[in-house]
Image (spheres, grey):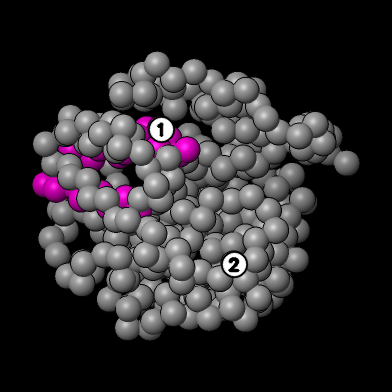
Amino acid sequence: MGKNIMNVLFSSDDKYAQHLGVAIYSLLEHNTAFNKITIYIVDNDISDINKQKLNKTADEFDNAEIIFLPFNKWKNKLHLNMKWDISISSYARLFIADMLPDDIDQVLYMDCDVIICESLENLWNTDLNNNVLGAVQDTVNDKTKEAVGLLPEDKYFNAGILLIDLKKWRKQNIGIKCLKFIEEKNGSVGHHDQGTLNGVLNGKWYRLPLKYNLMTIHYIFSYRKNKKYFKDHSNFYLYDDIENAKLHPAILHYVPSFTTRPWVSNCKHPKKNLYWNIISKTPWIDAKPEKDKSKWYVKLINFRYRKLYW
């Protein structure tokens, strides 16, 4: 596989197609140095109209190609007992070894709620030190770790951006191990597929620089507040690493983190305008901010944790 050829995987339903389009445009806009970027999209019932818009977005760039992968045949392999709302599209990454062609040795998986801000050449060429995947460490509490078999001192990664060595993934049967892990938890795993991957790959992943998955929490909470709230014992990124990542992010990940997403009217993210700047270049140019449909108590909790230190 050529180092100047990048394989990227997204997974989306029709509801997130607009946000996927923004992510794809930002990816291609900043990565014209690649000879070819093949974008695989796990298609969880994306409408024909939105597929046309996604293809139109990629057609603006000479080095891009989109390939849709139907998700329907894989859904039946999941036996879930979910207790809160999440798109099942998120679980698609567990089947990447079977979905993608056998001759693909490496893939960059990304969630749809991201903005790529610079070239990903250095990320794509990262040496994973013989690990199955590279990911950015996340801020979670001890109970979240304990729920998937981790100790307080163990590192926990966010699965929104994953640089995956598919050779090792296949050789170690990671997908099969993930399905078995879900079954052992009676179909209910904290943080869903992310928790599953952390439980299966505990200590067997490479920590990427924070700039490759800069999450909302680092803008909403100060470094001190993050450490206090999450009580992290696992040697998180240093203060300077976080501040530099905030100044020069490579990938912004718009997780909610006590606010909403940029496409919701009352979003507090300081870089929400990046989303709207990019959408103006896509077939979704006429999109408007959505009304916040969060429950009143969710809004109250969000306000509390953003504003009240006690």
Farthest residue toward the right? Answer: 310
User: In the displayed structure, does residue 97 sit left or right of residue 77?
Assistant: left
Distance in Å between CA atoms under marks 1 and 2: 27 Å
- On whether residue 220 falls in the magenta region, the answer is no
Q: Mark 1 points at which residue?
A: 18
- 299 in relation to 79, above or below: above
Q: Name the residue under label 2.
A: 80
Q: Which of 272 and 247 is in front in this view?
A: 272
Rendered-image quadrant of the N terminus: bottom left
Rendered-image quadrant of the C terminus: top right
Q: Who's the residue at 77% across and 51% down the image?
A: 228
Q: Quadrant of residue 52?
A: top left
**SS at circle 1:** helix
Amino acid at the residue labelled 2: Leu
The residue range painted magenta reads 15-42
**SS at circle 2:** loop
Q: Where is residue 293 in the image (x, y as percent from the top left)?
A: 67, 30
Q: Quadrant of residue 108?
A: bottom left
User: In the displayed structure, does residue 206 sit left or right of residue 280?
Assistant: right
